[in-house]
Amino acid sequence: MYDLLIGNIRELVPITEDESKLIQKSFEPITLNRKQYLLQSGEPCNHMRFISHGCVKLYNLDELGAEHILQFGISGWWINDLYAYLTQKPATFFIQAISESTVLQIHRDRLNELFDKIHMMDRFFRIKTQNGYVALQERTINNMSQSAEQRYLDFIVRYRDIEQQIPQYMLASYLGVTPEHLSSIRKNIRGH
Amino acid sequence: MYDLLIGNIRELVPITEDESKLIQKSFEPITLNRKQYLLQSGEPCNHMRFISHGCVKLYNLDELGAEHILQFGISGWWINDLYAYLTQKPATFFIQAISESTVLQIHRDRLNELFDKIHMMDRFFRIKTQNGYVALQERTINNMSQSAEQRYLDFIVRYRDIEQQIPQYMLASYLGVTPEHLSSIRKNIRGH
DNA sequence: GTATTCCATTAAGGTATCTTAAGAAGGCTA
DNA sequence: TAGCCTTCTTAAGATACCTTAATGGAATAC
């Protein structure tokens, strides 16, 4: 279970065996049933989370109670309400399992200890966050310049593995359209 | 000129006087006239950039040649085509001065040297990128869940200092609407 | 100081997407 | 097996936003 985590880190930075051991000891495993919450809006968010198995969604609710999915997470992805984690304010997002999932999480205090003991952990999270930032920038540009149909087509090519684990109405939420509209987009695509 | 840069770093991490000197030596100043490019699509992007004075925009062009502004940068902000910088692929964005500006920039090789010599520089960019990621997440959620009018009102409250330095059609581009539509939004606001 | 470009505004008609409502298929659960 | 969720689909009418075109004032260049 920890192999995926350590491999994920070693893809980006070198760490020794001792450091690997220390890292593994700092994370705790959590198992989630389908629809179970890992985090709910209003709660404190004191852990950084890595998905080792399954599929979860990060979303918020607007004033009308409508759900907006900001991110999906599958095996090998990091997911969190980063704002709440960093500021120690109550969460504004929910993290909920879409299917049965296993998560490895580390408490902020433990992670900060790792940052002080292992220079490469600062670098790992710097690079990881930079990559996430770049991906989010690209999504922002696409949302600004492309039609919903094009965004849908891009998603199913780029994230085929995610698309196969989630119901269509959640993908609609992520793309920023209604389920009805996504359905009609798919109907049009079948046409041409 | 370097005071703003060093202050920006010391807001987040501690650095010694010697380290501060080393950092200052690693950055080079660039002055830009109005409309001058700091980076153009297709060029290599080998520097990380800090705006010490003025106002610039980061944007791309879509297939139809329409401009989409991803980010503004004013005094005290970092700005870059981060994807091109990290991957060393040709830039896909433009960075252009909106008014006369001064930029401090550091070559990737110099910055990587700093990362190896000064642990806190890794931490500084980790935190800086995390904060940028959080801000971009919030923008993404707002784009998904709010009307153009609400996004406009939010912008002029949150970024009053930027709004006063840019023409309205650029703000429209940033918000993802046409200048005509933003104009009609403002007309409506005057009404109620 | 005049010409020219840039920028904001207005308005009419068009398109993408939403809202609401309804029905049907599939899969759990009792 | 029956019944209930969950999910996807369809369609009609509503709305937000876009496209195009035209105007006038302000800024800039010559």
Image (tube, coloured by chain):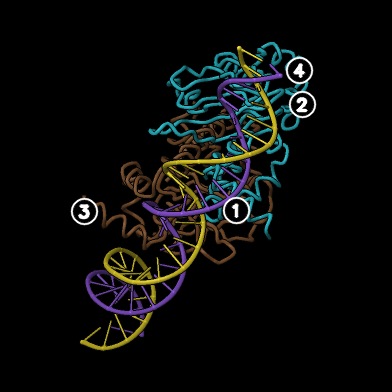
Chain colours: A brown, B cyan, C purple, D yellow
Amino acid type, callout 4 = Met
Tell whether label 4 touches label 1 (CB within 8 Å): no
Tell whether label 1 touches label 2 (CB within 8 Å): no
Count of number-bearing discs: 4
Task: Please give the label number shown on residue B149.
Answer: 1
Task: Give the residue pinned by disc 4.
Answer: B1
Relative image position of residue C14 (x, y in whole percent):
37, 52
Tell whether label 3 touches label 4 (CB within 8 Å): no
User: Label 2 crowding class (10 Å Cα cut-off): few <14, some 14-19, many 20+?
Assistant: few
Figure quadrant of the N terminus of chain B:
top right
Q: Nearer the viewer, mark 2 or mark 4?
A: 4
Q: Residue B180 occupies which quadrant of the picture? A: top right
- Compared across the picture, whether B181 is left or right of A166 comes to right
Q: Chain of mark 2?
A: B
Relative image position of residue B26 (x, y in whole percent):
65, 12
Relative image position of residue B189 (x, y in whole percent):
66, 55
Are the residues under marks 1 and 4 on the same chain?
yes
Q: Nearer the viewer, mark 2 or mark 1?
A: 1
